[in-house]
Amino acid sequence: MNYWLLIIPVISAVIGFTGSWIAGIILTKKIIPSRQEEMAKMIGQKAAEGFSITDMEQRVADPENIKKVMPVVEAHIDDFLRHKLKAKMPMIGMLIGDKTINSLKEVFLKEIEEMFPQVMAKFTGNLKNEINIEALITAKIRSVGPGAIRESLSPVLKYFGLSGAVVGFVIGLVNAALFLSI
């Protein structure tokens, strides 16, 4: 057996790794930055297709989500009735006690709980007219600098080079097998 044939897969792996590594560098330093505008538009379009304000509207108006917000609202109402209202209107502060504050708070909370879905529906409805998701995402991608692109793709490039080495090694094994069969 010719032991020098065993070097073929190793050389092929080195060539595969080097080729993939160089291709990755060219991709991140030249191709992606030069096509960034195109890519930004394409990604913006795809993201806008998948985004729905209606979905957001339903989630915001979901009773479970409203229940999660109510403790914060209750704390603000309590603070308003106990401190801010008394500071702004001292006469009222002298007339209302804890029982009245708790009754008022209960009425306010019930009203807010009924009103909140309508307010949020109006808010998200306004967002439909004011926010262009495609333009927003496209602008964000355009603003990413080439250095940030290279940095974010650097882990991928390691796998890119490794996969080139594996493919090169397999091709080298096939070549060695072909030489041995001749």
Image (cartoon, grey):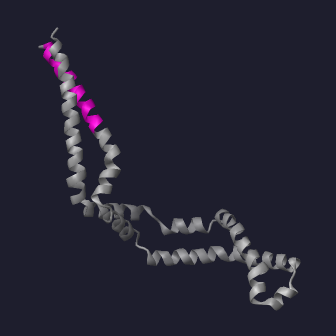
Name the side, left or right, on which 114 lies relative to 24: right
Tell me which corner region of the image, top left, top right, bottom left or bottom right, holds residue 50.
Answer: bottom left
Residue 106 visible, this orientation: yes
Where residue 45 sits in the image (x, y, percent)?
A: 35, 64
Q: Is residue 177 visible?
A: no
Q: In this view, does 82 lie to the left or right of 95?
A: left
Instruction: List x then y, in percent, for residue 59.
Output: 58, 64
Q: Which residue is drawn at the image coordinates 79% and 79% (left, top)?
A: 82
162 within the magenta span: yes
Residue at screen point 67% across, 67% down: 69
Residue at horizontal 50 percent and vertical 78 percent from the top: 126
Name the residue rendered at 29%, 35% in the picture.
Answer: 162
| Quarter of the figure with the N terminus | top left
Please report the bounds of the magenta region as a residue range.
161-181
Residue closer to the observer: 113 or 17 = 17
Question: Residue 58 at what x, y percent from top left?
Answer: 57, 67
Q: Taken as a whole, is the magenta stretch helix, strand or loop?
A: helix
**Location of residue 115 in the rendering, given as x and y in whole percent from the top left corner:** 67, 77
Which image quadrant for residue 23?
Answer: top left
Image side of residue 70 versus residue 3, left or right: right
